[in-house]
């Protein structure tokens, strides 16, 4: 069995890999799997490291039955009757990837999506989520420091860098500990406290972001206590403040006579409305780490922001780190994705326009949609350590069998969006989106 690893070319910062050299060597030795690696000038691991692991470096992957990657693949790359494994970003019917899906269907390809490798309880098993959170928090603090400096506030955050400018997580944590010493000793400017950071969501992505936040001295506040906490004006400028929002904090039943029910919300989101505007006036920073689809209420709407700014008011909100990064989604003022070379823009609530950088009237939006690429070695190693366990299962599959009879591991079968060019039963709903894109 030969497996190809495609080079990443989403942008010049995408140096991640699905399998690191160490695990390529392990799979080759233990399962006699041959790997062919496309050459790349930006990959975090060198071609020599892959050669030493027993891989072949060459451009042509046509002899490989299975081809794996990290991000989306250009339409002209696909070869007929191959199995592709990557983050396709299609399960929400994303229009920008429907033509890619159509091309795979035309070529009778099979598509397995990491995002849908889940257990029988729906828990994701293969993900970069923790590092998406880590990098988002690093970059959010970097953007906060620059924004406050532009507003005339001298804070220790202005010494922080974007994640890609650190050698790795150890250097990040070392730099942050130096900032901690300054905050503990000197405190933050009185005019910017309380510095409250809100985390929407509590899963792996949010935990990654909180891992960085928690380096600082902080106190956690319950969402229900935010108003009373701020009204008391009894807070230290030697601390940051953290609020974690769960579903019950984000939405309320439209019918006030019924109570919030988590499963009811998941199954009938149309019965609920956002209540997040109750909390926005207290936040300096918002980190958005929720899973969102069009059926769910929006957290930050253009209408709300416009109403506030038209009234001559200004929210304390300085930065939104939108990790979920659904364009005009849960953060409606996220008008477009960015990249690591130009990661932030300011959203003008009155004109509903954006301006790249940190200058302007309105919140700074961090909207990079492939954040883990800024710490490529560490994020790839963690991802690869999980993915390697699925590779032996994958190579044993007889893809000539009909889908209903194919002997495929349940976790991989759940992740199979296309099977020999046909939408599998769980993904038939994508036909509607494919038709719209004609």
Image: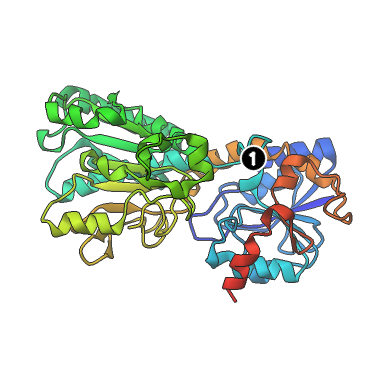
Residue 351 shows in the view: yes
Residue at the (24%, 24%) spot, across then down: 181
Count of numbered labels shown in the rendering: 1
Residue 172 shows in the view: no
Q: Residue 425: percent from the left, percent from the top?
A: 73, 54
Q: Residue 428: percent from the left, percent from the top?
A: 68, 59
Residue at the (88%, 56%) spot, across then down: 400
Q: Residue furthest front?
A: 257
Q: Quadrant of the C terminus?
A: bottom right
Residue at the (27%, 53%) spot, across then down: 364
Toward the viewer: 93 or 153?
93
Q: What residue is pinned by disc 1?
A: 384
Q: Locate residue 142: give its quadrant.
A: top left
Q: Is residue 29 above or below residue 9?
A: above
Q: Residue 259: percent from the left, percent from the top?
A: 40, 34
Q: Locate residue 243: give its quadrant.
A: top left
Q: Residues within 10 Å of mark 1 (few under 14, many from 20)?
A: many
């Amino acid at each position: 069995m030969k497996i190809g690893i495609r080079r990443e070319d989403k942008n010049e910062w995408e140096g991640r890999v699905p399998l690191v050299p160490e695990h390529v060597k392990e799979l080759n030795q233990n399962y006699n799997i041959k790997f062919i690696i496309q050459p790349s000038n930006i990959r975090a691991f060198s071609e020599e490291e892959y050669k030493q692991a027993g891989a072949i470096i060459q451009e042509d992957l046509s002899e490989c039955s299975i081809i794996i990657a990290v991000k989306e693949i250009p339409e002209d790359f696909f070869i007929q009757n191959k199995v592709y494994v990557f983050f396709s970003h299609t399960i929400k019917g994303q229009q920008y990837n429907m033509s890619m899906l159509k091309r795979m269907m035309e070529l009778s390809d099979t598509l397995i999506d990491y995002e849908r490798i889940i257990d029988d309880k729906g828990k994701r098993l293969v993900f970069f989520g923790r590092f998406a959170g880590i990098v988002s928090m690093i970059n959010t603090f970097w953007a906060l420091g620059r924004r406050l400096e532009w507003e005339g506030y001298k804070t220790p955050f202005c010494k922080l860098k974007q994640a890609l400018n650190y050698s790795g997580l150890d250097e990040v944590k070392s730099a942050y500990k130096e900032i901690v010493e300054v905050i503990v000793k000197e405190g933050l400017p009185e005019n910017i406290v309380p510095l409250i950071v809100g985390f929407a969501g509590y899963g792996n992505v949010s935990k990654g972001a909180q891992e960085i936040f928690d380096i600082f001295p902080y106190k956690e506040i319950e969402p229900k206590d935010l108003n009373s906490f701020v009204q008391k004006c009894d807070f230290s400028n030697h601390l940051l403040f953290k609020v974690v929002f769960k579903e019950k904090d984000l939405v309320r039943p439209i019918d006030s006579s019924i109570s919030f029910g988590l499963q009811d919300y998941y199954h009938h989101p149309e019965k609920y409305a956002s209540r997040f505007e109750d909390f926005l006036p207290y936040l300096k920073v918002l980190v958005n780490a929720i899973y969102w689809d069009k059926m769910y209420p929006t957290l930050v709407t253009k209408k709300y922001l416009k109403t506030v700014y038209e009234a001559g008011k200004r929210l304390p909100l300085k930065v939104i780190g939108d990790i979920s990064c659904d364009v005009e989604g849960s953060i409606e003022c996220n008008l477009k994705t960015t990249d690591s070379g130009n990661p932030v823009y300011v959203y003008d609530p009155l004109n509903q326009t954006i301006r790249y950088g940190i200058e302007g009237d309105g919140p700074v939006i961090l909207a990079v949609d492939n954040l883990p690429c800024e710490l490529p070695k560490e994020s790839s190693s963690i991802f690869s350590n999980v993915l390697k366990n699925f590779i032996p299962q994958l190579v044993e599959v007889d893809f000539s069998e009909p889908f209903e009879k194919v002997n495929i591991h349940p976790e991989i079968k759940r992740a199979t969006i296309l099977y020999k060019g046909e939408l599998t039963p769980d993904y038939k709903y994508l036909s509607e989106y494919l038709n719209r894109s004609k």
